Amino acid sequence: MRDKELSQIENTGWQRAAVLGANDGIISTASLILGVAATHASHQSILIVGISGLVAGALSMASGEYVSVSSQADTEHAALVKERAEIAADATSEHRELAAIYMQRGLNLDLATQVAQQLMAHDALGAHARDELGISERNTARPLQAAMASASSFAMGAILPLLIAVFASSKYLIPLIPCVALITLAFLGGLAAYVGKANILRGMLRLTFWGALAMGVTAAVGTLFGPMG
Ligand SMILES: [Zn+2]
């Protein structure tokens, strides 16, 4: 039961990250394409901008995620090294420390001492990692996995406006891309809210608002500085 609940929370986190990545991909690529389309650029230039936006965005999401999750992994690793040294140097006070944690969680002194003793005999570092530092096998930071998940969800979002740019002629891009992007964003916002058991309408409005703002501003910039040639 507890396992099922835990994995439900994890899934929610994973799904939320995927939705956010796709949201980034749609908003930034649709905005880029609109900005360039507003300058009356050639169809080929628009496609190059769209593809560059997809690749650059996916890689920048991957690198950002990799760096952030790696530094989290470094912090966890350093904490474990320190903890292992402390256990080796002074097992008695580490045992007392663990017992104190269990007492805070509601066990009486005798039981806390006993639990700390048995858990430390079984796996001292594991017990301290889990109950003192909050690190477990389950939530260990995995940088490469996180980077790939981020990049692919961004690419999945970015492919949508890019496909429209491939198949629609340039003059239809300006009405078509914002419409499809906003409908998809509303769907994603609603989905994220549904998964997180939040207000669905609010989730839809939040994403479409930011999407409309980003596309509107970029198209305005394109109109302001275009036409290029
Ligand atoms: Zn400790």
Image (tube, rainbow, N blue to C red):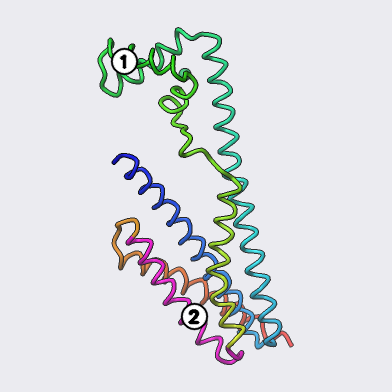
Q: Is residue 5 above or below residue 152?
A: above
Question: In the rendered structure, which amino acid carries the disc numbered 2?
Answer: Pro
Res 194 → quadrant:
bottom left
User: Tag on residue 178?
Assistant: 2
Q: Which residues are magenta?
A: 168-194
Image point 26% across, 22% down: which residue? 106
Helix, strand or loop at mark 1 = helix
Question: In the rendered structure, which amino acid carries the disc numbered 1?
Answer: Ala
Q: Is residue 94 magenta?
A: no
Q: Is residue 189 magenta?
A: yes
Image point 45% across, 13% down: which residue? 94
Q: Nearer the viewer, residue 186 or 218?
A: 186
Please state the horizontal and vertical placement of residue 143, each as a whole percent of the image.
59, 45
Horizontally, residue 19 falls left or right of residue 168, namely left
Quarter of the image that includes the C terminus: bottom right
Q: Is residue 185 above or below residue 87?
A: below
- Classify mark 1: residues with Cα within 10 Å, few (<14), some (14-19) or many (20+): many
User: Tag on residue 222?
Assistant: none
Please state the horizontal and vertical placement of residue 86, each as a whole percent of the image.
54, 14
Helix, strand or loop at mark 2 = helix
Q: Which residue is mark 1?
A: 112
The CB of the residue at mark 1 lies under 8 Å from ligand 1: no
Q: Main secondary structure of the magenta part?
A: helix
Q: Is residue 164 above or below residue 117?
A: below
Mark toward the start of the polypeptide (2 vs 1) = 1
Q: Rounded to the nearest whole Å, what is the CA distance between mark 2 and mark 1?
A: 60 Å
